[in-house]
Image (spheres, coloured by chain):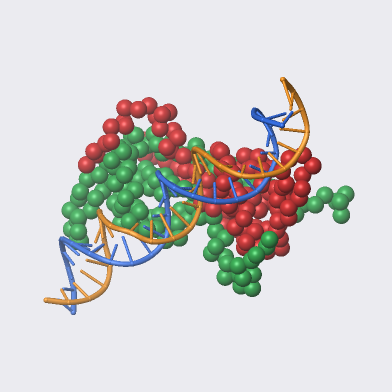
Chain colours: A red, B green, C blue, D orange
Amino acid sequence: MRCRAGNESRPVSARREETGVGPPRNYLRPCVLLLLAEGTSHGYELLEQLGPFGFVRVDPGGLYRCLRAMDEEGLVSSTWQPSTAGPARRTYALTDEGREWLHLVVGSLGELARSLEMYRSRYQSLGAVPDTLR
Amino acid sequence: MRCRAGNESRPVSARREETGVGPPRNYLRPCVLLLLAEGTSHGYELLEQLGPFGFVRVDPGGLYRCLRAMDEEGLVSSTWQPSTAGPARRTYALTDEGREWLHLVVGSLGELARSLEMYRSRYQSLGAVPDTLR
DNA sequence: CGTCGGTAGCTGCAACCTACACCTACCGGC
DNA sequence: GCCGGTAGGTGTAGGTTGCAGCTACCGACG
């Protein structure tokens, strides 16, 4: 057992990027829907607004694919708008169905948050050795 | 635009399972490491203990693969133990390196939790229309 | 006029992770 | 012998993601 791959000599900091858990699966859709609930927008703008949601580097391709998929599913509606300066924009707005979806997804995000909270408390209990055992 | 796939007639409850965001990517490893930090265990037992961590149905294949990978990386150590009743068990214990990894991953889980908290507060602000606008 | 940078949207593809199915083997009991 | 429960393991298809690149529009500048 314990046939290490020879990476035990690397410092911990060099492995830091491997330890991340990353955003939840399908996290992009809820974030885009929330942003659209705060106001209509277009892809390029959403790209910049997605930063605070824990995405290290938002992938434009993924965002546009996500937007088109939600458009086809009726969660958002899109209208082309010619821009005064620059190429035309596809402006997205939340539909009623998208708002429903948003309300639903908040529930599952809450479950995830509860799971994370349980993790944190159990992790903290590890260090809390009762005095009687010391 | 808005070429819906014809699913708008289905009740919301029928689409509930599609709205989930699922656990974070690479969430299994942190959970297993936490369980092993609480005490040595073996795969079959971990399978049952993983329920509360938000996994709807834990995949045995994935768990065993995960355990073997962490064994090869030196995060856990394994020893075969003959069982009195039933087949032999492979008992896993956390190594010092695994404990380091656990400390690191808690940080990234905290970032995720903060992102979720921001999401929740922004979601709640949606309904809070200021009185001056009513 | 040409071309350069910034804005805007979109496609292809490889890598990765996961979920699902399936398999072997051990043991006790009927 | 055979069955069910325990325990560990493999193979693989599909979905998501990340990365790279591509078209096109516009204004500005030389």
Q: Is residue B56 left or right of residue A68?
A: left
In the picture, measured across the screen, residue A13 lies left or right of residue A100, that is: left
Image height of D27 relative to A33, above or below = above
Residue ID at (32%, 47%): B67
* Residue A88 place in picture, x, y as percent: 73, 46
Question: Is residue A128 among the parts visible in the rendering?
Answer: no
Q: Residue at x 43, y 28 (%)?
A: A13
Rendered-image quadrant of the C terminus of chain B = bottom right
Give coordinates of residue D21: x percent, y percent: 52, 39
What's the residue at 56%, 38% (across, down)?
A: A57
Q: Residue at x 73, y 40 (%)?
A: A86
The N terminus of chain B sits in image quarter: bottom right
For this view, does C25 lie left or right of residue B11?
Answer: left
Find residue A71 and report its horizontal and vertical position in percent. 65, 59
Q: Position of residue B131 (x, y in %)?
A: 85, 51
Q: Residue A99's image quarter?
A: bottom right
Q: Is residue B66 visible?
A: yes
Image mark count: 0
